[in-house]
Image (cartoon, rainbow, N blue to C red):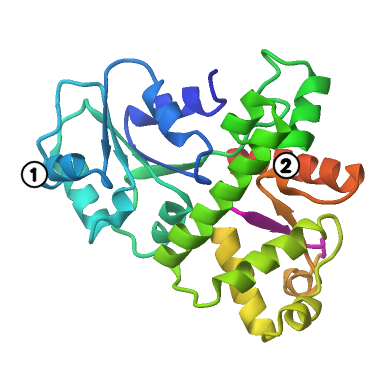
Amino acid sequence: MQRSLEPFIKQDLVNKLVLLSGPRQVGKTTLSQQLGGTTSYLNYDARAHRKILLSQTWDRSCETVVFDELHKMRRWKSWLKGVFDTEKRPPAILVTGSAKLDVYRKGGDSLAGRHFVYRLHPLTVKEVSSFLSSEEALKRLIDVGGFPEPFLKADPVFAKRWRRRHLDVVLRQDLMDIQPVRDIKSVEVLVEILRERVGTPVSYASLAEDLQVSINTVKHWLEVLENLFVIFPVRPYHRNVARSLLKEPKYYFYDTGAVEGDSGAKLENVVACAFQAELQFHE
Protein backbone atom coordinates (compact mmCIF):
# COMPACT_ATOMS: atom_id res chain seq x y z
CA MET A 1 0.00 0.00 0.00
CA GLN A 2 1.40 3.36 -1.02
CA ARG A 3 1.16 6.10 1.58
CA SER A 4 -0.05 9.48 0.31
CA LEU A 5 3.20 11.23 1.31
CA GLU A 6 5.46 8.95 -0.75
CA PRO A 7 5.54 10.89 -4.05
CA PHE A 8 6.16 14.19 -2.27
CA ILE A 9 8.98 12.78 -0.15
CA LYS A 10 10.61 11.30 -3.25
CA GLN A 11 10.46 14.69 -4.96
CA ASP A 12 12.03 16.55 -2.01
CA LEU A 13 14.78 13.97 -1.48
CA VAL A 14 16.35 15.06 -4.76
CA ASN A 15 17.57 18.32 -3.24
CA LYS A 16 16.96 18.31 0.51
CA LEU A 17 17.23 16.34 3.70
CA VAL A 18 13.80 15.05 4.66
CA LEU A 19 12.81 14.62 8.32
CA LEU A 20 9.86 12.26 8.72
CA SER A 21 8.28 12.17 12.16
CA GLY A 22 5.05 10.79 13.56
CA PRO A 23 3.64 8.41 16.13
CA ARG A 24 5.39 5.19 16.97
CA GLN A 25 4.34 2.30 14.66
CA VAL A 26 2.52 4.57 12.21
CA GLY A 27 4.50 3.17 9.27
CA LYS A 28 7.55 5.45 8.92
CA THR A 29 10.04 2.60 8.50
CA THR A 30 7.81 0.77 6.02
CA LEU A 31 7.35 3.94 3.98
CA SER A 32 11.11 4.59 3.92
CA GLN A 33 11.78 1.07 2.65
CA GLN A 34 9.30 1.25 -0.21
CA LEU A 35 10.38 4.54 -1.79
CA GLY A 36 11.81 2.65 -4.75
CA GLY A 37 15.37 2.14 -5.89
CA THR A 38 18.11 0.83 -3.63
CA THR A 39 17.89 1.82 0.02
CA SER A 40 20.30 1.46 2.92
CA TYR A 41 18.49 1.43 6.28
CA LEU A 42 20.42 2.23 9.46
CA ASN A 43 18.84 2.28 12.92
CA TYR A 44 20.81 4.05 15.65
CA ASP A 45 19.34 1.66 18.23
CA ALA A 46 21.14 -1.30 16.60
CA ARG A 47 24.76 -1.65 17.73
CA ALA A 48 26.04 -2.74 14.31
CA HIS A 49 24.19 0.08 12.57
CA ARG A 50 25.41 2.60 15.15
CA LYS A 51 29.01 1.65 14.38
CA ILE A 52 28.41 2.26 10.67
CA LEU A 53 26.82 5.63 11.38
CA LEU A 54 29.59 6.86 13.65
CA SER A 55 32.29 5.77 11.20
CA GLN A 56 30.21 7.03 8.24
CA THR A 57 30.85 3.84 6.26
CA TRP A 58 27.37 3.25 4.81
CA ASP A 59 26.93 2.17 1.19
CA ARG A 60 27.31 5.23 -1.08
CA SER A 61 26.14 3.30 -4.15
CA CYS A 62 22.51 3.14 -2.97
CA GLU A 63 19.96 5.75 -4.02
CA THR A 64 18.66 6.55 -0.53
CA VAL A 65 20.08 6.14 2.96
CA VAL A 66 17.65 6.12 5.88
CA PHE A 67 18.80 7.20 9.35
CA ASP A 68 16.27 5.97 11.92
CA GLU A 69 16.21 7.20 15.55
CA LEU A 70 19.19 9.43 14.76
CA HIS A 71 18.08 12.02 17.33
CA LYS A 72 19.50 9.71 20.04
CA MET A 73 23.00 10.60 18.82
CA ARG A 74 24.66 13.41 20.75
CA ARG A 75 24.70 16.64 18.68
CA TRP A 76 22.89 14.80 15.88
CA LYS A 77 21.87 17.95 14.01
CA SER A 78 25.44 19.26 13.71
CA TRP A 79 26.58 15.79 12.62
CA LEU A 80 23.80 15.60 10.03
CA LYS A 81 24.59 19.10 8.76
CA GLY A 82 28.20 18.05 8.20
CA VAL A 83 27.15 14.91 6.34
CA PHE A 84 24.71 16.80 4.12
CA ASP A 85 27.22 19.56 3.30
CA THR A 86 30.11 17.23 2.43
CA GLU A 87 28.47 14.16 0.88
CA LYS A 88 27.78 13.84 -2.83
CA ARG A 89 24.26 12.93 -3.94
CA PRO A 90 23.04 10.28 -4.30
CA PRO A 91 22.44 8.83 -1.84
CA ALA A 92 19.58 11.03 -0.72
CA ILE A 93 19.13 11.27 3.06
CA LEU A 94 15.87 10.50 4.88
CA VAL A 95 15.80 10.85 8.66
CA THR A 96 12.96 9.10 10.48
CA GLY A 97 12.01 8.96 14.12
CA SER A 98 9.13 8.84 16.54
CA ALA A 99 7.52 11.96 17.95
CA LYS A 100 10.77 12.83 19.71
CA LEU A 101 12.33 13.82 16.38
CA ASP A 102 9.69 16.51 15.95
CA VAL A 103 10.45 17.85 19.43
CA TYR A 104 14.24 17.84 19.11
CA ARG A 105 14.05 19.40 15.64
CA LYS A 106 12.81 22.67 17.14
CA GLY A 107 15.96 23.48 19.08
CA GLY A 108 18.63 25.45 17.22
CA ASP A 109 18.98 26.08 13.51
CA SER A 110 21.81 23.74 12.48
CA LEU A 111 19.74 22.40 9.59
CA ALA A 112 18.31 25.73 8.43
CA GLY A 113 17.76 25.76 4.68
CA ARG A 114 18.76 22.12 4.30
CA HIS A 115 15.64 20.17 5.14
CA PHE A 116 11.91 19.76 4.75
CA VAL A 117 9.68 18.21 7.39
CA TYR A 118 6.84 15.73 7.00
CA ARG A 119 4.54 14.18 9.60
CA LEU A 120 3.13 10.75 8.89
CA HIS A 121 -0.36 10.23 10.31
CA PRO A 122 -2.44 7.11 10.86
CA LEU A 123 -4.58 5.97 7.93
CA THR A 124 -7.66 7.93 6.91
CA VAL A 125 -10.66 7.08 4.74
CA LYS A 126 -9.12 9.11 1.91
CA GLU A 127 -5.80 7.27 2.05
CA VAL A 128 -7.26 3.76 1.84
CA SER A 129 -9.91 4.58 -0.76
CA SER A 130 -7.94 2.69 -3.44
CA PHE A 131 -8.66 -0.71 -1.88
CA LEU A 132 -11.54 -0.24 0.59
CA SER A 133 -14.98 1.30 0.29
CA SER A 134 -15.58 4.45 2.33
CA GLU A 135 -18.11 2.61 4.49
CA GLU A 136 -15.75 -0.24 5.36
CA ALA A 137 -12.82 2.15 5.94
CA LEU A 138 -14.86 4.30 8.30
CA LYS A 139 -16.08 1.25 10.21
CA ARG A 140 -12.50 0.01 10.68
CA LEU A 141 -11.27 3.41 11.83
CA ILE A 142 -13.99 3.54 14.47
CA ASP A 143 -13.58 -0.09 15.57
CA VAL A 144 -9.79 -0.61 15.53
CA GLY A 145 -8.17 2.76 14.69
CA GLY A 146 -5.98 3.95 11.83
CA PHE A 147 -2.57 2.58 12.78
CA PRO A 148 -1.59 0.23 9.92
CA GLU A 149 -1.17 -3.05 11.83
CA PRO A 150 -4.53 -3.15 13.67
CA PHE A 151 -6.30 -1.47 10.73
CA LEU A 152 -5.18 -4.12 8.24
CA LYS A 153 -5.91 -7.00 10.64
CA ALA A 154 -9.38 -5.57 11.36
CA ASP A 155 -9.66 -7.64 14.54
CA PRO A 156 -10.98 -5.70 17.59
CA VAL A 157 -9.41 -8.14 20.08
CA PHE A 158 -5.99 -7.86 18.42
CA ALA A 159 -6.39 -4.06 18.25
CA LYS A 160 -7.09 -3.86 21.97
CA ARG A 161 -4.01 -5.93 22.82
CA TRP A 162 -1.88 -3.93 20.36
CA ARG A 163 -3.11 -0.62 21.82
CA ARG A 164 -2.27 -1.60 25.38
CA ARG A 165 1.29 -2.53 24.43
CA HIS A 166 1.70 0.51 22.18
CA LEU A 167 0.70 2.99 24.89
CA ASP A 168 2.88 1.24 27.43
CA VAL A 169 5.96 1.62 25.20
CA VAL A 170 5.16 5.28 24.47
CA LEU A 171 4.72 6.20 28.13
CA ARG A 172 7.51 4.10 29.63
CA GLN A 173 10.18 4.59 26.96
CA ASP A 174 9.50 7.63 24.77
CA LEU A 175 8.10 9.71 27.61
CA MET A 176 11.13 9.09 29.78
CA ASP A 177 13.46 10.01 26.92
CA ILE A 178 11.83 13.39 26.39
CA GLN A 179 10.78 14.43 29.88
CA PRO A 180 11.41 12.24 32.92
CA VAL A 181 8.08 11.96 34.76
CA ARG A 182 7.96 10.35 38.16
CA ASP A 183 4.23 9.71 38.29
CA ILE A 184 3.68 7.70 35.09
CA LYS A 185 0.62 6.05 36.62
CA SER A 186 -1.15 9.40 36.86
CA VAL A 187 -0.31 10.13 33.22
CA GLU A 188 -1.89 6.78 32.32
CA VAL A 189 -4.99 7.77 34.30
CA LEU A 190 -5.05 11.11 32.46
CA VAL A 191 -5.08 9.24 29.13
CA GLU A 192 -7.97 7.07 30.34
CA ILE A 193 -9.94 10.15 31.42
CA LEU A 194 -9.37 11.86 28.05
CA ARG A 195 -10.55 8.74 26.21
CA GLU A 196 -13.96 9.23 27.83
CA ARG A 197 -14.11 13.00 27.17
CA VAL A 198 -13.43 13.14 23.44
CA GLY A 199 -15.76 15.64 21.80
CA THR A 200 -16.30 17.75 24.92
CA PRO A 201 -14.34 20.83 26.07
CA VAL A 202 -11.70 19.83 28.62
CA SER A 203 -11.40 21.77 31.87
CA TYR A 204 -7.86 21.93 33.23
CA ALA A 205 -9.22 22.60 36.70
CA SER A 206 -11.46 19.53 36.55
CA LEU A 207 -8.58 17.33 35.40
CA ALA A 208 -6.35 18.72 38.14
CA GLU A 209 -9.00 17.90 40.74
CA ASP A 210 -9.50 14.38 39.39
CA LEU A 211 -5.76 13.67 39.41
CA GLN A 212 -4.99 15.57 42.64
CA VAL A 213 -2.25 17.66 41.01
CA SER A 214 -1.84 21.31 40.07
CA ILE A 215 -3.30 22.84 36.92
CA ASN A 216 0.22 23.58 35.66
CA THR A 217 1.14 19.90 36.06
CA VAL A 218 -1.91 18.86 34.04
CA LYS A 219 -1.03 21.35 31.28
CA HIS A 220 2.54 20.06 31.23
CA TRP A 221 1.42 16.42 30.95
CA LEU A 222 -0.99 17.32 28.13
CA GLU A 223 1.80 19.08 26.27
CA VAL A 224 4.08 16.05 26.64
CA LEU A 225 1.33 13.71 25.37
CA GLU A 226 0.85 16.06 22.43
CA ASN A 227 4.59 15.98 21.66
CA LEU A 228 4.45 12.18 21.75
CA PHE A 229 1.63 12.14 19.17
CA VAL A 230 -0.82 10.53 21.59
CA ILE A 231 -3.33 13.42 21.50
CA PHE A 232 -3.79 16.77 19.79
CA PRO A 233 -5.88 19.80 20.81
CA VAL A 234 -8.46 21.73 18.85
CA ARG A 235 -9.02 25.17 20.33
CA PRO A 236 -12.18 27.28 19.93
CA TYR A 237 -11.97 29.76 17.08
CA HIS A 238 -11.75 33.43 18.04
CA ARG A 239 -10.54 36.45 16.07
CA ASN A 240 -8.36 37.29 19.06
CA VAL A 241 -5.77 34.47 19.12
CA ALA A 242 -4.72 35.18 22.71
CA ARG A 243 -8.32 34.87 23.87
CA SER A 244 -8.82 31.59 22.04
CA LEU A 245 -5.88 30.14 23.96
CA LEU A 246 -7.66 30.86 27.23
CA LYS A 247 -10.79 28.94 26.28
CA GLU A 248 -11.23 25.23 26.97
CA PRO A 249 -9.96 23.06 24.09
CA LYS A 250 -11.09 19.66 22.92
CA TYR A 251 -8.56 16.84 22.79
CA TYR A 252 -8.56 14.07 20.21
CA PHE A 253 -6.51 10.87 19.85
CA TYR A 254 -4.29 9.98 16.91
CA ASP A 255 -5.41 6.41 17.59
CA THR A 256 -9.12 6.72 16.78
CA GLY A 257 -9.77 3.24 18.13
CA ALA A 258 -8.78 4.42 21.62
CA VAL A 259 -11.90 6.55 22.05
CA GLU A 260 -14.42 5.44 24.67
CA GLY A 261 -17.98 6.66 24.35
CA ASP A 262 -20.85 6.74 21.88
CA SER A 263 -20.55 6.53 18.11
CA GLY A 264 -20.82 10.30 17.83
CA ALA A 265 -17.63 10.89 19.81
CA LYS A 266 -15.79 8.21 17.82
CA LEU A 267 -16.93 9.67 14.50
CA GLU A 268 -15.92 13.17 15.62
CA ASN A 269 -12.42 11.88 16.47
CA VAL A 270 -12.11 10.20 13.04
CA VAL A 271 -13.06 13.47 11.31
CA ALA A 272 -10.68 15.49 13.51
CA CYS A 273 -7.79 13.15 12.60
CA ALA A 274 -8.59 13.45 8.89
CA PHE A 275 -8.59 17.26 9.12
CA GLN A 276 -5.38 17.26 11.17
CA ALA A 277 -3.57 15.11 8.60
CA GLU A 278 -4.82 17.22 5.69
CA LEU A 279 -3.98 20.55 7.34
CA GLN A 280 -0.48 19.48 8.31
CA PHE A 281 0.11 18.19 4.79
CA HIS A 282 -0.84 21.58 3.33
CA GLU A 283 1.29 23.33 5.95
Density class for disc 2 (Cα within 10 Å; few <14, some 14-19, many ≥20) is: many
Q: Position of residue 3 (x, y in %)?
A: 54, 25
Q: Nearer the viewer, residue 51 or 154?
A: 154
Quadrant of the snapshot with the N terminus: top right
Q: Residue 257 shows which numbered tag?
A: 2
Residue 280 at least partly seen: no
Range of the magenta residues? 228-238
Residue occupying the point 73% across, 71% down: 245
Percent x, y of residue 275: 73, 41
Question: For the point 65% across and 47% down, which residue is it?
Answer: 254
**Dot 1: what SS?**
helix
| Amino acid on which the number 2 mark rests in the picture | Gly
Residue 179: name its quadrant. bottom left
Is residue 70 something that shows in the picture? yes
Quarter the C terminus occupies: top right
State whether residue 156 is above or below residue 172. Answer: above
The residue carrying mark 1 is 55
**Residue type, mark 1 in image:** Ser
Q: Residues within 10 Å of mark 1 (few under 14, many from 20)?
A: few
Report the predominant secondary structure element of the magenta stretch.
loop
Q: Which residue is at 57% across, 25% downward?
A: 4
Q: Is residue 58 above or below residue 152?
A: below
Q: Residue at x 67, y 42 (%)?
A: 160
In the image: residue 211, left or right of residue 11: right
Specify whether residue 237 is painted magenta: yes
Q: Could you tell which of marks 1 and 2 lies nearer the N-terminus?
A: 1
